[in-house]
Image (cartoon, rainbow, N blue to C red):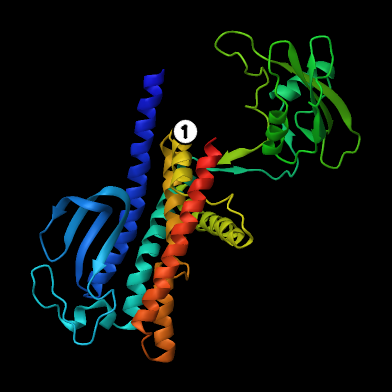
């Protein structure tokens, strides 16, 4: 068992690195193709950082794979500030024509080259979400209250007390406590709430866990047959701790069929084409909200490499289609973040090109360099904070 766990952990780490490399390589491919489209000289297209373990030196651009697969880059001639009269040499130590230097290109080509990485990430996200909507679908529900279907554990328990229990019930209140075998309530164990979704039901139940076979969990529910029905019914559901060797400490109560009564809607090929744009629009709103929470000191909805690995680890057990969704989500997030007008990112560099277009003169290269350096340090610090948060969350 321990060997299997270690083996699966290695497999999931490999899947995580493949997904990371795929999304980054697509991003950098966008920069490379647009740079070549506008005849900007590219020294290198590289996946990863550190020492090169593979290099293809055919043609003017070197294609490299480096030891640390946590990033990538395209090195273009003239990305950094040039001194007056400075001459750049290509990979063969020959002078690079001035018209092939990035900083000498026209403004629109420079903007498109910088934006191409994020655009390619969005294209990859669209493809992944498109496959997800056709192969897996989305949950459809119109009800704002908790719905418990008739084959759910709670509904079955209620049905034993009342033959007229409806197929779907709406929970209005829930009280939970632990008792011993003789009915004595364990001190400090009672919690109550008005759950509005399945996660809130789970949270309430998880607050009160039987610790041994001599304890039971009592759930007292106030429910009705419809959202507007105020003729509330009461029911009590009792669950116990399993006592056999393999399942000791687990609860008899099952969450499998409890929650929103939803249907999974899959889309056909032509229907999925516009629906994927709608799906991406909804995802865009969610990621904007998560990003906006940064300004009030909330990091809960942001994840670093540790958090992303944890999501990949969970999705890998669900099959290929959920993993495709994760690839799309990571690619969308990478593209969105890089296009933000933040120094050191592609969006921040685009801002300086726009300033140059408006003022009709170039920003002092040293000033721009310092701004990007400060932006990089702030982003690096944010990344450390988010990863620390993810690591603490593991425990």
Q: Position of residue 31 (x, y in %)?
A: 30, 66
Front residue of 290/324: it is 290
Front residue of 52/203: it is 52
Q: Position of residue 148 (x, y in %)?
A: 72, 31
What is the quadrant of the C terminus in the image? top right
Identify the residue at horizontal 64%, vertical 12% (top origin).
242
Identify the residue at horizontal 30%, vertical 83% (top origin).
106
Residue 68 seen in the figure? yes
220 relative to 73, above or below: above
Left or right: 286 as drawn, with respect to 235: left
74 relative to 50, above or below: below
Total marks placed: 1
Left or right: 103 as drawn, with respect to 233: left
Which corner quadrant of the image does residue 284 belong to?
A: bottom right
33 relative to 196, above or below: below
What is the quadrant of the N terminus in the image? top left
Identify the residue at horizontal 41%, vertical 47% (top origin).
327
Front residue of 114/140: it is 114
| Mark 1 Cα shell of 10 Å, populated few (<14), some (14-19), many (≥20) | few
Which corner quadrant of the image does residue 189 belong to?
A: top right
Left or right: 98 as drawn, with respect to 319: left
Left or right: 367 as drawn, with respect to 39: right
Which corner quadrant of the image does residue 291 belong to?
A: bottom right
SS assignment at label 1:
loop
Front residue of 388/98: it is 388
Q: Position of residue 28 (x, y in %)?
A: 31, 60
Residue underneath mark 1: 318
Residue 266 seen in the figure? no
Q: Position of residue 269 (x, y in %)?
A: 44, 49
**Furthest residue in direction right, as rendered:** 231
């Amino acid at each position: 068992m321990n060997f299997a766990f270690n083996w699966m952990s290695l497999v999931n780490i490999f899947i995580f690195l493949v997904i990371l490399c795929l999304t980054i390589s697509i991003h950098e491919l966008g920069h490379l193709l647009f740079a070549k489209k506008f005849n900007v000289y590219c020294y290198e297209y590289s996946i990863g950082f550190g020492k090169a373990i593979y290099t293809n030196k055919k043609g003017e651009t070197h294609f490299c794979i480096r030891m640390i697969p946590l990033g990538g880059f395209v090195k273009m001639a003239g990305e950094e500030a040039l001194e007056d009269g400075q001459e750049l040499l290509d990979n063969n130590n020959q002078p690079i024509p001035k018209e092939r230097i990035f900083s000498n290109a026209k403004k629109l080509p420079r903007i498109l080259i910088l934006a191409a990485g994020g655009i390619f990430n969005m294209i990859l996200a669209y493809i992944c979400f498109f496959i997800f909507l056709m192969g897996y679908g989305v949950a459809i529900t119109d009800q704002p209250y908790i719905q418990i279907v008739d084959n759910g554990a709670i509904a079955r328990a209620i049905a034993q007390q009342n033959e007229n229990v409806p197929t779907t019930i709406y929970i209005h209140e829930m009280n939970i406590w632990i008792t011993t075998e003789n009915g004595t309530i364990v001190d400090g164990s009672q919690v109550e709430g008005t759950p509005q979704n399945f996660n809130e039901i789970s949270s309430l139940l998880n607050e009160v866990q039987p610790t041994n076979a001599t304890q039971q969990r009592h759930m007292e529910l106030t429910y009705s047959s419809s959202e507007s029905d105020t003729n509330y019914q009461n029911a009590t559901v009792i669950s116990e701790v399993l006592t056999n060797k393999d399942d000791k400490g687990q609860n008899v109560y099952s969450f499998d069929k409890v929650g929103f009564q939803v249907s999974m809607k899959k889309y056909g090929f032509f229907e999925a084409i516009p629906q994927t744009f709608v799906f991406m629009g909804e995802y865009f709103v969610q990621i904007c909200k998560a990003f906006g929470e940064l300004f009030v000191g909330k990091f809960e909805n942001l994840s670093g490499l540790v958090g992303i690995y944890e999501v990949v680890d969970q999705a890998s057990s669900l099959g290929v289609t959920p993993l495709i969704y994760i690839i799309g989500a990571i690619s969308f997030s990478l593209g969105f973040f890089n296009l933000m007008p933040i120094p050191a990112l592609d969006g921040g560099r685009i801002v300086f090109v726009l300033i140059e277009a408006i003022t009709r003169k170039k920003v002092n290269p040293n000033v721009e360099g310092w701004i990007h350096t400060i932006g990089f340090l702030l982003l690096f610090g944010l990344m450390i904070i988010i990863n620390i948060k993810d690591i603490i969350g593991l425990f």
